Image: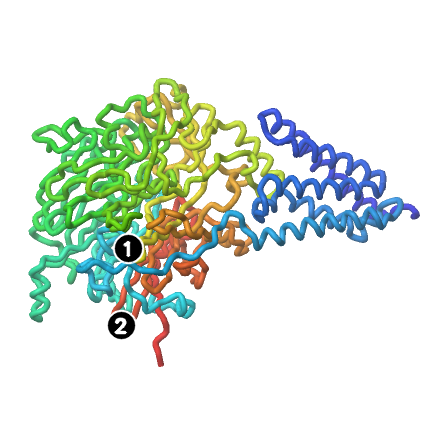
């Protein structure tokens, strides 16, 4: 071959430059990785790549042979590490395959001194083998479980539900939190025909005074012909259930500021005086507030409003407005936030609230209170951090600072008159050397109280001395389950951030599914302590194995290498690895495998639908020192306005930095999937099927609908039509799946993020499915103000 043309010289130079840079990066980064205990692959591949670069510069076709062997060895190593998982294989091979194709392009290949069909054929074969492995992996996902739920149904017990089939009168449809509807007009056969029936915009959008954590998490309720829902700023709307037209609205006048940690409303509660039913049947208008809506507001108020007109209930508290800040030791607006709808019995409103995570040791009490549903009079209190939890402060006394709180929705068993509250941990969350025995006593577990008196029935702790913010984050679900001996057992399911689902006898709090105490890593931060064991439920979605270097991920081998280095530099010994100054990998992460969306349970079939996540976090303790004072600002300004980033933890020896475990490019360092939908047979407590859910369409710079399994906020609802619905994912979709198999049957593009749990109802024989599409500020989805209803087209 004659002399190179200038174009060929430029091409060869660029090819060599890429190979040198790639080889040097892998060699240097690989050496760093091996120094911290990681894989030798990157050092070896870096050396081979530098040899390849040298041979390309010499115009030797041996470069093709060396590179072909590198490509084949890489694919073999990748399959050995992660199996046939496409999204795990892709970053290990994408750059190699693309560069191999480049070397075979005619204008590159002509730059070698002599042609060698054997060398070119070997490289071509290695590319084909690599492509074949990737293609096989696309259709053989080792993370998914395929199966079919049993179809035999248990007979519904007599009087199982007093709720009309057409209604959805509580956050979880019923106060048992099942998120199950007996409606079956929409089925797994016709759900593909769903179309928009109506859409409503609330007009409530993020303002300059709002924190980043502004969210539209509402699940509307439906009673008779009206939907009731609240917006992020707790504006209450009543909508016509057929048309979506506004009937009335009520604005409580919330005045948030950027120090609020949350601006959100998950829902409202409904109460009906039995006399109202007979009045309505007699064609008479019920008395004012005989049917009422209870609206929690983030500044520590509760409103009672007439369900028909939206007028305040004049006999309730102060003209329909109840001050929940009364007797709180800290009354800074936003420090105590009721974000979830209260439980309402025939006579009592049971309400708790959120407090600012990780701000200081002087925060509001997490006191749980019972108020008369008609008058708003305080009937009882349960202050989890007090020596006597039922003591009601008098005179100048207040509830206890930093009592553990319950921010997620609760559940209620009317027959037992027990309310089940998922409990959080006393703040600050990530260091606990200061905590008293009283503050530990009812933290991070499930609390059962008598709803009429507030007296303790039982408590089950799911995390001992919680240093990971592993509170119970979701509404518990109540169900009557047939055990292996044919006995009916009344149970409560408590999904946990740890991925465990604790199954307890709801009468006694005793475990129905074993949850043995298991040894966990030790070695706390200075001045703290640890529990030697933690309970591990045998019904669980937690990972079977601890994370390792092979689980690290990136878009390419380059950022994957960085994630491997970061992983090995963090402290990580599996679940419950203690927080540290070194930086601790927390997996399951602080966001949790389960969040406030909970699970959906079909009690007749005795099955559950769940949507667990798998996204690690990193916590790093920051010792007090310059720029990190132990006391809050003297001007009294409070709140962090966020649940991630630097958290001050005033009053304890450490602040903390909390963030998702991401690469420098902003991608998760743990390989996908990060989110699934799954089904459990509750008679056997076995996972029957599990599927990835969600695409990167709204997360990546290029809007490609790659199904990777995305993080979620929100939960599923299931129906008698063998179909369940879920939004929640970090892409803007509402989806329907087969309950039996997990097959995706339908999806609708939403105009904003669907970080809410949908609901379904019926009017005049027509079934609707409704979701709030308003996005989630800190989750990064598109914000909006939409309420959208879907239904089957009318028969002509």
Mark 2 to mark 1 CA distance (whole Å): 24 Å
Q: Residue at x 24, y 59 (%)?
A: 156
What residue is pinned by disc 1?
603
Observer-side mark, 2 or 1, equals 1
User: In what quadrant of the picture does the C terminus appear?
Assistant: bottom left
Q: Residue at x 28, y 28 (%)?
A: 635
Q: Residue at x 9, y 59 (%)?
A: 274
Residue 110: percent from left, percent from top: 84, 50
Residue 155: percent from left, percent from top: 25, 60
Instruction: Look at the picture and state if 246 lies above or below 393.
Output: below
Color scheme of the displayed model: rainbow
* Mark nearer the N terminus (2 vs 1): 1
The answer to whether one can see residue 7 in this image is: no
**Residue 315's mark?**
none
How busy is the neighbourhood of tag 2: few (under 14 within 10 Å), some, or many (20 plus)?
A: few
Q: Residue at x 40, y 44 (%)?
A: 778
Total numbered labels: 2
Instruction: Look at the picture and state if 201 lies above or below 691.
Output: below
How busy is the neighbourhood of tag 1: few (under 14 within 10 Å), some, or many (20 plus)?
A: some
In terms of depth relative to the viewer, which is nearer, 49 or 530? Answer: 530
| Left/right of residue 338 with respect to residue 558 in the rendered view | left
Residue 719: percent from left, percent from top: 32, 61
In terms of depth relative to the viewer, which is nearer, 787 or 332? Answer: 787
**Residue 765's mark?**
2
The answer to whether one can see residue 83 in this image is: yes
């Amino acid at each position: 071959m004659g002399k190179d043309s200038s174009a060929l010289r430029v091409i060869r130079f660029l090819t060599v430059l890429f190979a040198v840079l790639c080889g040097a990066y892998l060699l240097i980064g690989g050496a760093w990785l091996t120094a911290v205990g990681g894989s030798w692959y990157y050092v070896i591949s870096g050396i081979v790549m530098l040899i390849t670069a040298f041979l390309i510069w010499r115009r030797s076709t041996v470069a093709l042979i060396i590179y072909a062997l590198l490509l084949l060895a890489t694919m073999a190593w990748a399959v050995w590490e992660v199996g046939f998982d496409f999204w795990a294989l892709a970053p290990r091979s994408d750059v190699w395959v693309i560069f191999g194709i480049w070397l075979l392009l005619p204008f590159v290949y002509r730059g070698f001194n002599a042609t060698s069909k054997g060398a070119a054929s070997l490289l071509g074969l290695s590319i084909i083998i690599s492509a074949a492995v990737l293609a096989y992996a696309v259709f053989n996902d080792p993370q998914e479980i395929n199966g079919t739920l049993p179809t035999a149904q248990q007979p519904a017990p007599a009087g199982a539900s007093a709720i009309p089939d057409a209604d959805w009168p509580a956050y979880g449809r019923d106060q048992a939190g099942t998120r199950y509807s007996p409606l079956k007009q929409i089925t797994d056969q016709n759900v593909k025909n769903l179309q928009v029936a109506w859409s409503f915009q609330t007009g409530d959008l993020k303002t300059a005074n709002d924190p980043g954590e502004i969210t539209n998490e509402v699940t509307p309720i439906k009673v008779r012909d009206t939907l009731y829902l609240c917006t992020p700023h707790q504006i209450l709307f009543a909508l016509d259930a057929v048309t979506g037209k506004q009937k009335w609205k009520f604005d409580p006048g919330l005045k948030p500021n950027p120090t609020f940690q949350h601006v959100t409303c998950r829902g409202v509660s409904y109460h009906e005086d039995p006399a109202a039913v007979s009045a309505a049947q007699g064609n008479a208008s019920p008395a004012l507030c005989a049917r009422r809506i209870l609206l929690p507001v983030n500044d520590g108020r509760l409103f009672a409003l007439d369900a028909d007109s939206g007028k305040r209930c004049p006999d309730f508290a102060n003209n329909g407005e109840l001050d929940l800040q009364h007797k709180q030791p800290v009354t800074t607006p936003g420090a105590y936030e009721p974000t979830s709808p209260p439980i309402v019995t025939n006579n009592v409103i049971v309400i708790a609230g959120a407090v600012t995570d990780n701000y200081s040791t002087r925060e509001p009490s997490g006191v749980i209170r019972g108020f008369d549903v008609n008058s708003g009079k305080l009937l009882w209190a349960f202050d989890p951090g007090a020596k006597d939890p039922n003591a009601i402060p008098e005179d100048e006394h207040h509830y206890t600072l930093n009592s553990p709180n319950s921010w997620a929705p609760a559940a209620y068993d009317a027959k037992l008159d027990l309310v089940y509250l998922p409990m959080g941990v006393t703040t600050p969350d990530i260091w606990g050397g200061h905590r008293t025995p009283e503050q530990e006593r009812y933290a991070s577990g499930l609390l059962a109280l008598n709803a009429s008196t507030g007296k303790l029935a039982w408590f089950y702790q799911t995390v001992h001395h919680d240093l990971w913010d592993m509170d119970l984050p979701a509404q518990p679900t109540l169900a009557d389950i047939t055990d292996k001996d044919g006995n009916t057992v009344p149970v409560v399911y408590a999904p946990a951030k740890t991925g465990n689902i604790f199954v307890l006898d709801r009468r006694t709090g005793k475990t129905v599914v074993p949850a043995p105490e298991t040894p966990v890593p030790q070695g706390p931060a200075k001045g703290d302590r640890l529990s030697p064991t933690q309970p591990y439920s045998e019904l669980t979605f937690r990972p079977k194995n601890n994370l390792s270097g092979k689980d690290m991920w990136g878009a390419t081998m380059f950022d994957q290498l960085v994630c491997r280095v970061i992983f090995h530099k963090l402290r990580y010994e599996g679940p419950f690895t203690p927080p540290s100054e070194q930086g601790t990998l927390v997996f399951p992460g602080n966001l949790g495998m389960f969040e406030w969306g909970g699970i959906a349970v079909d009690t007749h079939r005795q099955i559950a639908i769940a949507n667990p996540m798998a996204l690690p976090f990193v916590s790093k303790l920051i010792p007090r020192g310059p720029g990190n004072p132990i006391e809050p600002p003297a001007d009294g300004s409070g709140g962090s306005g966020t649940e991630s980033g630097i958290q001050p933890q005033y009053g304890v020896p450490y602040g903390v930095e909390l963030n998702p475990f991401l690469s420098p490019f902003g991608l998760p360092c743990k390989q996908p999937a990060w989110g699934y939908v799954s089904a459990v047979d509750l008679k056997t407590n076995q996972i029957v099927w599990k599927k990835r859910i969600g695409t990167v369409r709204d997360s990546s710079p290029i809007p490609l609908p790659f199904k990777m399994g995305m993080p979620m906020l929100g939960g599923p609802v299931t129906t008698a039509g063998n179909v369940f619905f879920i939004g929640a994912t970090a892409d803007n979709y509402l989806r329907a799946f087969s309950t039996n198999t997990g097959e995706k049957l339908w999806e609708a593009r939403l105009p904003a993020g669907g970080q809410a749990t949908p609901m379904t109802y019926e009017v005049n024989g027509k079934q609707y499915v409704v979701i709030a599409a308003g996005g989630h500020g800190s989750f990064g989805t598109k914000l909006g103000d939409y309420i959208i209803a879907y239904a089957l087209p009318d028969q002509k």
